[in-house]
Image: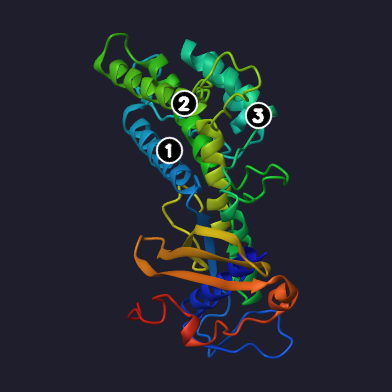
Amino acid sequence: MFTYKAVEENSQVIACDIARYLFQGDVTEAPAGSHAPCAISNPAQSTPGIVIISSDSSLISDFQLWRADMATMSALESRANDVCVAPEAKNENGQETPAQPPQRKSRGLTGSGGLAGTAAALAKLTPQGAAIGAALEMFSSSQTVTSVVGTVQNPALLNEVARELRSLNVLVLVPELYNPNALGATDYTNSPYMQNLGGLYSSYEKCAKAKAGATENSPEAASIDGVIGAMDTFLKAVLAAPAAGPAPGNPADKTAEPPAAPPSHLAAVLSADEVAKQMGFTGNGASGSSATWQHVLWLKALESGGSVNRQSNLFGTKVTFGGGAVDTYSVFRLNGELVCSGNVFNFQSPVRTKDLQKTFRAAPEDNPAKRSMLHSTCAMLPPS
């Protein structure tokens, strides 16, 4: 009990310290009856936001994969625009005729430019495209997005800090506890990743048509084949099945549970894509997130635990209880610059059984608005 009380008090210190920075104000005591751990006076920003991740989160690696895929698709589209140029049409007199303007294809996921259209068209283009198209067909009807959660201690700390920040009017995303739209309706029309994938398909189709009109064994045909091959390689990597996890330690142990399969490449990038969309990324992601989502909070529950002390002598046994927790955190801007960091710790000295309930329900002697409880650097670092 004292352990989780310590986690709660630590979370209040962390939230007030971070809110001080995000609002660029001063921490004061919360008014009587408030559910917030403190108050921020003279705030400079009305509604800031922060993305919370724990030391066990896969969000950063998933986001790096998403960013790499977005850059790869944009590069392949650009290369296709340079290489996959259809030859000029000629009339019966051998004179060039102006090409008809191509019909603009939808980059959404409905109609011929959508996911189903992508699957059907890829299946018609090349043997490699047939395999990719089959995988896309399966994915269009079923999706599994797997998110990784933290340890027993980390989710408690994440929940506590998120609640305290919300009480201070800070917007919060905690993707490893609930990824945006994980149980919501599927909507790929505003998905940056799927829009880019639709654009890649359009480029694929353009290259296939250009190849059909190119002279066989010509340098132009070879260049087009190179672009198509690069697209095939990329799509195969995106749609590959996840690698098998390590085998159980003792094959003879029938009760051992098989290791959980890691999420596939596509599941990981789509999970990151939902976070990116929530943060305001659009198009190929180059425009960046909205002004609200410019900070990341990294949390870790370092140590926690309770203690039961028994002291015996001639007159009997005295039992006392104690407990505490140590947590650490860092706040970064999206560009990687450290905003502040710190360790917070709280410990209840041993109390006797008869005083247990009274001590547990008592308000903390200190509060987050007082400097003596603030073991961090947010207030001491120079302003950005």
Tell me residue 213's x, y (percent): 39, 16
Which of the two discs, 3 and 1, labels the residue nearer the N terminus?
Answer: 1
Give the residue drawn at x 61%, y 33%. Answer: 114
Callout 2, which amino acid? Leu
* Quadrant in the picture for residue 203: top left
Q: What residue is shown with label 1?
A: 69
Q: Which residue is mark 2?
A: 235
Residue at the far front: name it.
314
Residue 18, x across and y down, in percent: 49, 74
Q: State how the image is colored.
A: rainbow
Q: Which residue is mark 3?
A: 140
Is 227 or 128 nearer to us in this picture?
128
**Crowding at label 1, few (<14), some or many (≥20) Cα neighbours within 10 Å?**
many
Residue at image point 57% right, 80% down = 46
Residues at marks 2 and 3, CA–CA distance in whole angstroms: 15 Å
In the rendering, at what x and y percent does residue 251 appear?
Answer: 55, 15
Which image quadrant: the N terminus? bottom right
Looking at the image, residue 259 lies above or below residue 71: above
Distance in Å between CA atoms under marks 3 and 1: 19 Å
x then y, percent, for residue 23: 51, 80
Element assignment for label 3: helix
Q: Residues within 10 Å of mark 3 (few under 14, many from 20)?
A: some
